[in-house]
Image (cartoon, rainbow, N blue to C red):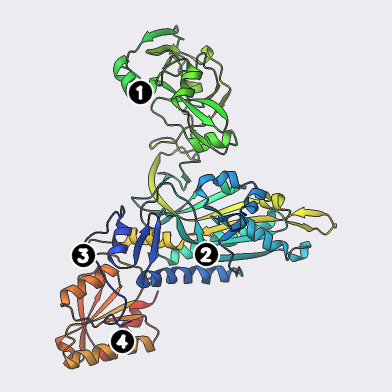
Amino acid sequence: MKLKNSFFYTLRENGKDEDSKSSNLLVRAGMIKKSSAGVYMILPLGYKVLNNITGIIREEMNATECQELIMPALIPEDVYVASGRRDGFGKSMFSLKDRFAKPFVLGPTHEELFAMAAQMKIRSYKDLPFSLYQIQTKFRDEPRPRFGLIRVREFIMKDAYTFDRDETGLDVAYAKQFNAYKKIFDRLGLDYKIVKADTGVMGGLLSEEFQAVTDIGEDILVLCDQCDFASNIEVAQCVVDENPTTLEQMKLELVETPNARTIEEVVDFLKQPASKFVKTLIYQVDDKVVACMVKGNREVNETKLRKLYNALNVELADAETVTRVTNAAVGFAGPIDIKCELVMDNEVSKMHNFITGANKTGYHYIGVNISDFNATLVSDIRNIQEGDTCPHCGGKIYFKHGIEVGNTFKLGTKYSNALGLEFLNAENQLQPVWMGSYGIGPARCMAAIAEQYADEDGLSWPMSIAPYKVAVVLISIKDEVQTELANKIYDMCHANGIECLLDDRDERPGVKFKDMDLIGVPVRITVGKKAIENIVECKVRGQQDITEIHFDELLTKLKDMTEE
């Protein structure tokens, strides 16, 4: 590409309303532009990067003998009703009606349609296994789009699906896709972790996430300082540290705590550490009210609570509900005589002589023990914390933040059972097909790589996905010798399959250098005063050294530098 007559621009100022390093730099580099909250234009330079990412994905998908197709984005709503997922998506699914008042949705994911397509082929066990994938636009009505391409309402996804006779076959297909994902993210140059995760609205037997490690990542990755344990905080198991000390049971005592509602306020009032308190939080779990008990220095894990009750929705109860089940104002809830189901965290079950709310406005109990109330359930319902014990090896837990760039699911027979996807086995009996689902967000990958590789000068793409591998900067467009040599290098690169751009704009050299750094081209060739000697300058993005090289040696040098 020659810049003079191309769609190319950069911005000197930071992008308006961009809240991440990657989105700000991608906007400034002229690669993306926001058209509305959570919706972005992918401009020519950004599209080059995105195409390089999807090219790698396609190569690895095709290597697994996965066949590509394309599904519609406009889908009859009853497809999701039939699978039982319409309520699970709720308001996050864009809904509309056609001129005949028939309800449609914009597809957030495509398990149902792939199952319907598979029905066209599958009759007997001889038709299995096989796998399909697409790279297509998805839509989700995010309540808070943020971080540029990371949390959006319209996005491109590569989703793949495998179809097998039984769980053993699914295990084989899953491993094949899983290994392909590792190859993809390795080729993209991402620093990533693979963590166990919640299956969420997808459902199924297993979910694993590929998380790009970045400071702005929305997900909290739970890691161990001694072993390879890795989990999303949503599903990380908490270990209860056994305390063999037997304490003499105190007498239950009601104490006045005026205007002390929060843990911090009660800690300050009673002069006791937060670890001696147990807080009782009231949740609305679908149509059921549930009180949850965790230590005062812990937090309830809503994902664990949702799975415990097999619920669709979990949220803190409103003030009216809290008052109804506690007979007290918000801030004084406790387990004794509460008028709803009570779930106690495993850790609380090992505590003695703790402090709780008294279900009486302005009062708390001290000297509380588990014999003073009746818990409906005892379960792991808290978030793991840094410094906690690793559930695998006993090491210490620490956190990193991550951007989910890929996920893999063992769906089992969930969708097959719901949608009647069956086959005849060797005994001529109908059996449900075993499915797997596998997703990658190419634009999320683009943003994650930008986050990991950017520096103070701008973007710095790995060679594998850079929009152009070489930038030829022409210092003086009025110098015929320089112009001739710059064009000669440009043509040579294209003739040898090296993606190259030529900056032939009428701009100052400093402007051109800054722009090439900003857009992140890995190698810069500067054609200046020594063009008359057929000598140019070569600089690698992010390095200070500049090397002079003769044109006759340049092609060999560039081939070596641009090999992935």
**Left or right: residue 53 compared with residue 519:** right
Q: Which amino acid does label 2 sit on?
A: Gln
Q: Where is residue 285 in the image (x, y as percent from the top left)?
A: 54, 32
Q: Which is nearer the N-term, disc 2 or disc 1?
A: 2
Where does the image place residue 72, in percent across and percent down from the top left? 58, 64
Q: Residue 262 carries which label?
A: 1
Q: Measure the C-alpha gap from mark 1 to mark 3.
A: 47 Å
Q: Using a 10 Å C-alpha cutoff, classify the residue at mark 3 as few (fewer than 14 neighbours), some (14 to 19) or many (20 or more).
A: few
Please name which of the two marks, 4 or 1, marks the residue nearer to the observer: 1
Residue at mark 3: 12
Q: Nearer the viewer, residue 287 or 268?
A: 287
Q: 160 or 235: nearer the eye?
A: 160
Which quadrant holds residue 12? bottom left
Quadrant including the C terminus: bottom left
* C-alpha span from label 4 to label 3: 27 Å
Badge nearest the viewer, 2 or 4: 2
Rounded to the nearest whole Å, what is the CA distance between mark 2 and mark 4?
34 Å
The residue wearing badge 2 is 136
